[in-house]
Structures are given as structure tokens and as C-alpha cells.
Amino acid sequence: MKKIILTGGGTAGHVTPNIALIPRLQSLGWEVEYIGSKHGIEQRLISELHIPFYGIASGKLRRYFDLQNFIDPFKIIKGVFDAYFLLRKIKPDIIFSKGGFVTVPVILGAWANGIPIIIHESDITPGLANKISIPFATKICVTFPETLKYIPQAVFTGLPIRTEILGGNAERGREFCGFKQELPILLVIGGSSGSEKINLAVRKILGQLITKFQVIHGCGKDNTDRNFDDLPNYKQVEYLGAELADVLAIADVIISRAGANSIFEFLALKKPHLLIPLSKAASRGDQILNAQSFQHLGYSSVLSEEDLTSESLWQAINQLYDRRQEYIEAMTGSEIGDIISRITQLIEQVVG
């Protein structure tokens, strides 16, 4: 049986595309195993799937000053040796890496063992871990065609989406939220950890929003506000996990950050959405580029974080809802294709 090692971690965004590939890989006869950090989110997410998981030492690659910067290089070196000897024992046919700091030791260990490596980059410009890893890759997959300007040797594939996201149940979604069918439904999500700025702007206009919408608000861990618990047409939760697919099924319009996983899910589901990307002050600007790409294609409405106020948000939500059919038509015309097949075919071509 052919064996593949998936790797990626640090955030859910570096894990869920790997999870999307697993069912197809298994149906094609691949034995799937995973290497990640010992204490990262990837261990929990992969263990739930009963996939063999191996934890290695890893250090974070930072672009800013931190005392840990003096310690983490030694963790990375240890991680390289961990990965090298682990891969000699496992003997996979290929490595598929989704990015995140834990992948650098895995890729270096695989390269030293002569194992083919495929890297996938989610954003328009490559992250630091992928920048380091690209010279060791056999093939590079990218999510956006614009990325080919930065990595001309790459292959445009798009981003794999979990099939369960596409199969949400509207009845279960309404039951979870306690919503009726009289008013349209607005979903607000600020990423897996929530967004304080989005939360604040939404709460300032909740009185207006609940007259026009039923609002389901993913606030982030410890970010719910008990003062709004009894508000009609409003439900707040810390995090949407297993319920996300069902809630997406009932959402008429969505407010969200502009992470690649989220926006490709909205595209696949043809859900009109307003993107509020992380600012450059809080990120390397990748979400801004993601949002601009989708805005240019007519898929997304965009409001910059610098321009985010309760007034601008109210205006943007109303414009999005009024023009929702235009966005649906634009997304319906997209050529997203079968991304999972595209990537798994590439994996099989590399192995031969």
C-alpha cells in the first residue's frame, strides 16, 4: 500500500485542507499518517480522525523580537533530527505539506531522506515557513493564480474544501440557532479565535441588525457577552465547530475575516459575504491580498479594518444584502472545479 505523510499545523487553517484530502486519499488506497507539533491544534484535530499522529519538536518562526527567538532555533534543529529518523522508520512514499512552522523540520528531514515533497500555499504570497521550504520541494501547489508571479514554478490547484462543509443541514442549523424563517440570517465569524474589533462594531448596531436579520455570532473563546443573552433574533457562541456546516447552510449573508479556507468555503457554497481582512498592523497582509483577489473577481464585498466603524459596517451589510444576487451569480460562474482530485492526481503523478 502507498503511504503518504501529511504535515501542517500551528493554526486550523494549516490543518483543515489536509483533512479535506484524507477521504479521497484513502479511497485511492493510500495509507495516511500525520506529523505535527507535540502540543499544536493539529494533534487534536487529527486524533479525532483516528489517523496515526507523530509529534516532533518545533519552534516558531517569528518576524519580530522575542526572547523565544534565541531558544526556538534549537527546537527546530531537534525537530529536523526527530523528523529525519521518524521518516526513516515510517518510510512514506511522499510528503504533503500545508505550511506552518512545524513543517520546516519535516520537509528538511524528508529531503535528507530523498522523499518527494509537495508543498501547498494557501495565500497569495508565501508564508515564512513555505518560503524556507520551497527550495526543497518536488512540486508546489498554490491557491490563487496571482501567486504564480511569486512562485513561477508552482502549479495552480486551488484550496481543498472539506466535503462535510458542503453538506450542512438547514433544519439542524435553525434548531441550533433557535431561528424561524421570517427574517434572513446573518452569520458573523471572526476566525477561530474571534475578532474583538468586529465583535465591538457588531454589538454597537445589534439593535438595528435584529430588526432586519436573525444574527448568529461566533465571538471567539471567552468573548461572548452575557448582556446580550436574552436579545431576540440573536445567538452568540464562542466557536462554531461541528455546527458550522449546518449554520452555513442557513446563512443568507456572512461577515468574516479573509482567511483562505473561509473564503473558499463561501465560494463553494455560493454565500454572499463581507470580508474584513486583518490589517497589516496585525498580520503580514495576506488576508488583504486574499480579499482583494476575491473582490476583483466579483465574489466578495470588502471593508478594511481601518475603515471599520459601526456606521460603515451597517452600510456595508445593507449593500451586501441588497446586491446578494449579483455576488451569487459571480460565484456561480467561477471555475473552482474538483480541487481535491486535482491535488490527489498530482500526488500520484509525483510518486509514479
Image (cartoon, rainbow, N blue to C red):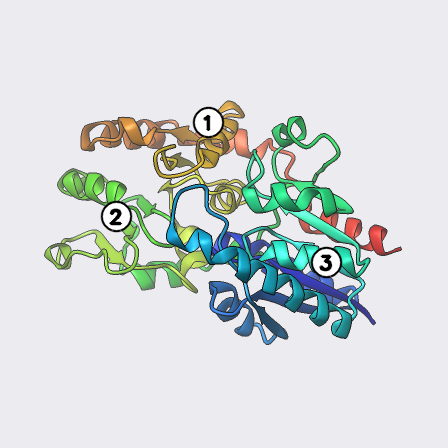
- Asked if 187 appears above or below 73 in the picture, the reply is above
- Numbered disc 1: secondary structure: helix
| Residue neighbourhood size for the residue with mark 2, other residues' Cα within 10 Å, grouped as few (<14), some (14–19), many (≥20) | many
Q: Is residue 316 rendered to the left or right of residue 115?
A: left
Q: Answer yes or no: do the residues labelled 3 and 2 have beta carbons within 8 Å?
A: no
Q: Residue furthest left?
A: 227
Q: Viewer-proximal residue, 203 or 138?
A: 138
Q: Amino acid at mark 2?
A: Gln
- Numbered disc 2: secondary structure: strand
Marker disc for residue 95: 3
Pointer 1 or 3: first along the chain: 3
Question: Where is mark 2, residue-wise?
Answer: 214
Quadrant of residue 179 within the rendered picture = bottom left
Residue occupying image coordinates x 45% and y 41%:
63
Q: Answer yes or no: do the residues labelled 1 and 3 have beta carbons within 8 Å?
A: no
* Numbered label tally: 3
Q: Residue furthest right?
A: 352
Q: Residue furthest top?
A: 296
User: What is the C-alpha distance between the residues marked 2 and 1?
Assistant: 22 Å
| Residue neighbourhood size for the residue with mark 3, other residues' Cα within 10 Å, grouped as few (<14), some (14–19), many (≥20) | many
Q: Is residue 220 rendered to the left or right of residue 68?
A: left
| Residue neighbourhood size for the residue with mark 1, other residues' Cα within 10 Å, grouped as few (<14), some (14–19), many (≥20) | some
Q: Amino acid at mark 1?
A: Glu
State which quarter of the image contains the N terminus.
bottom right
Q: Answer yes or no: do the residues labelled 2 and 1 have beta carbons within 8 Å?
A: no
Q: Is residue 244 rendered to the left or right of residue 102?
A: left
Quadrant of residue 93 within the rendered picture = bottom right
Residue occupying image coordinates x 53% and y 62%:
75
Q: Position of residue 244 (x, y in %)?
A: 42, 57
Residue occupying image coordinates x 64% and y 31%:
145
